[in-house]
Image (tube, rainbow, N blue to C red):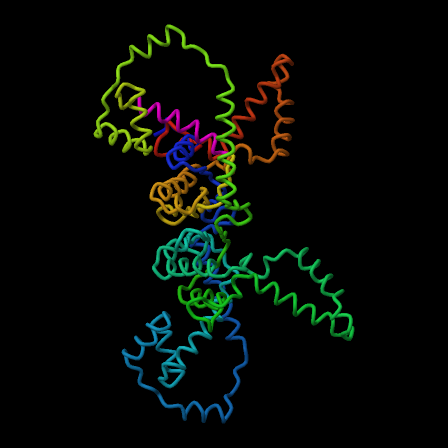
Amino acid sequence: DNAKTVEDVIKEVTAELGEKISIRRFVKYTLGEGMEKREEDFAAEVEAQTKALKAESDAKKAEPKEEPKEEEQKEETAKPTIAITAKQVKEVRDKSGAGMMDCKKALGECDGNAEEALIWLRKKGIASADKKASRIAAEGAVGSYIHAGARLGVICEVNCETDFVARGDRFKELVADMAMQIAACPDIEYVSPDDVDPAMVAAEREVQMKMEDMLSKPENIREKIVQGRLDKMVNEKALLKQDFIRDNAKTVEDVIKEVTAELGEKISIRRFVKYTLGEGMEKREEDFAAEVEAQTKALKAESDAKKAEPKEEPKEEEQKEETAKPTIAITAKQVKEVRDKSGAGMMDCKKALGECDGNAEEALIWLRKKGIASADKKASRIAAEGAVGSYIHAGARLGVICEVNCETDFVARGDRFKELVADMAMQIAACPDIEYVSPDDVDPAMVAAEREVQMKMEDMLSKPENIREKIVQGRLDKMVNEKALLKQDFIRDNAKTVE
């Protein structure tokens, strides 16, 4: 319904649930954005491979042939030919995921021993995975994981080389595992140790070199000790160096190499974001005794103030109007109808119908006006509860994670709030240009720079000086609102904004 913006929706839900509701933050991933894409030219690739093979063949022919040593000849003669059955090949293939001929060759090299064949394939696979590391992987999938209770959520992008591999079950399983792995590691901050900030490492090195325990060490070994400490610190925050949650005998890096070998394409984790509900926010300290005391004092002060006011006699016209207004009989069916449509309380619905002479449509408008007014009053409250939500679009090429806050865990567990979180995640995915939640979140420096550019534009110089500022402000407001989530038309009701 394009009659609403996202801002309108947030105000309505705030009125309906009786708590401040706010969208705190979001991240949107579009698969491969900003990455270099590989230009496919199969004719040129085949030609290059043919030339490489010809050059390799010519080089081998040019090399002088060496006579095999007597020991090697004996070993070759002594090595018996092992009969490899289809059952053995299938067993190794099921466990390794490698090709049929590779499994047969591995069994042949290992005298039919399946366990040794798996080790042989793994060594061969890891070697081939290392060779694939220089390739460009710009396909893949965006994945997410929301932990039970919706207080922790992850979004990540895992890349491969082709869309064919990205659609496969093995790759999808890897993406899901990586999202869960990130959620399970509280201290990780980046994918690889190579992603660490060099300035941070340099500053930490300086601190470590000046520590008291280091000054007592011989100078020639201080650098090595500090480097060891830095490596440990960096690795503890790198995803690739963590133990894999499904098999602690492997690291995440080992798993990535194994899947690279298994699927025959370069696999890489590009980026991730992890949200923990309410992290960094001020939490409200509940003190019910103090709150009740404060409310009692406020009510007493209000009552005393009313008693002190001189009573005014009602005007004759008002008296006539009150007398003329008939009492409308409100049925339970009418109350239920308005309550189902508005989500408001039973007594509020009854009062609204009474004020609107039993007209359900007018009662809904009356409640909405009342609700929006109360929503504005709630805007100053602290909302540190809520939920983390995600949305992955069909095809897993676009994904969103967001945090929506409310005041109490009771509201956060309700179906209406959960529905709102899901709607907001989908809303963010549907808006390609948004960059922040509210216009208040825009960078003032960017606005100042844009204002300066706008004031110097040719079409502006022809306008009277007294209206230039207003025109530029109008343009800036439009630009800022186009990138703010709260000012977008709500995807389920375009008559409202998100706010």
Q: Tell me if residue 157 comes above or below residue 115 in the rendering.
A: above
Q: Quadrant of residue 462?
A: top right
- Which of the pair 48/61 is nearer the observer? 48
Instruction: Name the residue at 30% across, 75% down.
Output: 90
Q: Is residue 316 left or right of residue 437?
A: left
Quadrant where the N terminus is found in the figure: top left
Residue 457, percent across and down? 62, 22
Q: Tell me if residue 424 comes above or below residue 300 in the rendering.
A: below
Residue 277, percent across and down? 48, 49
Q: Quadrant of residue 264?
A: bottom left
- The magenta region covers 362-379
Q: Is residue 283 left or right of residue 265?
A: right
Residue 471, percent across and down? 57, 19
Q: Is residue 416 magenta?
A: no
Instruction: Name the residue at 50% across, 46% down.
Output: 286
- Which of the pair 351/81 is nearer the observer? 351
Q: Is residue 370 magenta?
A: yes
- Which of the pair 323/309 is nearer the observer? 309
Q: Tell me if residue 433 comes above or below residue 175 in the rendering.
A: above
Quadrant where the C terminus is found in the figure: top left
- Which of the pair 214/138 is nearer the observer? 214
Count of number-bearing discs:
0
Q: Tell me if residue 399 comes above or below residue 180 in the rendering.
A: above
Q: Main secondary structure of the magenta part?
A: helix
Instruction: Name the residue at 49% across, 35% down.
Output: 295
Q: Is residue 167 left or right of residue 129?
A: left
Residue 199, percent across and down? 68, 55
- Seen as rendered, the residue at the extreme top is 316
